[in-house]
Amino acid sequence: MNCYCDSGLWFSSCCEPYISGQQNAPSPQALMRSRYSAYCIENWQYILHTYGERQRQSLSASDLQASAQNTRWQRLEIVATSDYATNSQNNLVEFKAYYLFEGKAHVLHETSRFEYQQDGWRYTTGVIHDDSGIIKLGRNDKCLCGSEKKYKQCCMRLQ
């Protein structure tokens, strides 16, 4: 099965080893991709674990689950990444995550910051861009899942 993060790789050789705990993500981008995949498969414990230590103190797996209720993730697009270094606090990944929420298409456009902590890369903060929110999709527009089909012939049917 193709990985949820749209890397073009199989899930078993892309994000699954990180989500299952077999390996640590080797870079901020790999962690970002695995966090997206974890949202797709609803692995709230992994998402919680990949937050920075300070951020985890005010979160729980049930909080994450509640915030993603009625959300169906469609596609991840990596926009840009910074060169990363384990001793830097400026390890950035800019992405767009497309999703359906309560029957409407949305995009989350964020620049996320990652830090290398004792046990690997962790998500610490993010800045949400102004173009995040509802996307107006017409029936004949391309589907946001990346299938290249028209929206009406693809995900619109699933709503």
Image (cartoon, grey):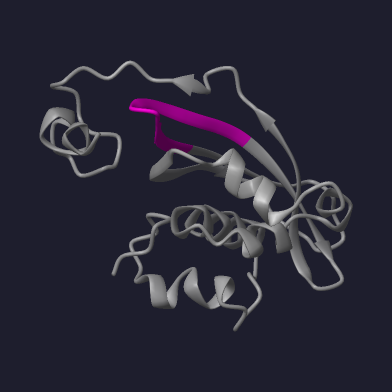
Return the x and y of residue 24 as percentages of the image width and height.
Answer: 66, 75
Q: Nearer the viewer, residue 29 or 98?
A: 98
Which SS type dominates the magenta stretch? strand
Q: Residue at x 84, y 46 (%)?
A: 58
**Please, is residue 61 above or below residue 66 in the view?**
below
Task: Report the quarter where the C terminus lies.
Answer: top left
Please tell me in which quadrant of the rendered image residue 118 appears.
bottom right
The mark tally for this picture is 0
- Which span is picked out in magenta? 97-110
**Please, is residue 88 above or below residue 148 in the view?**
below
Q: Residue at x 59, y 49 (%)?
A: 65
Q: Residue at x 30, y 35 (%)?
A: 144
Q: Was residue 106 drawn as part of the magenta stretch in this picture?
A: yes
**Please, is residue 59 above or below residue 11 in the view?**
above
Task: Report the quarter where the N terminus lies.
Answer: bottom left
Return the x and y of residue 25 as percentages of the image width and height.
Answer: 63, 70
| Residue 17 visible, this orientation | yes
Please tell me in which quadrant of the rendered image residue 149 appears.
top left
Return the x and y of residue 139 as percentages of the image width and height.
Answer: 15, 21
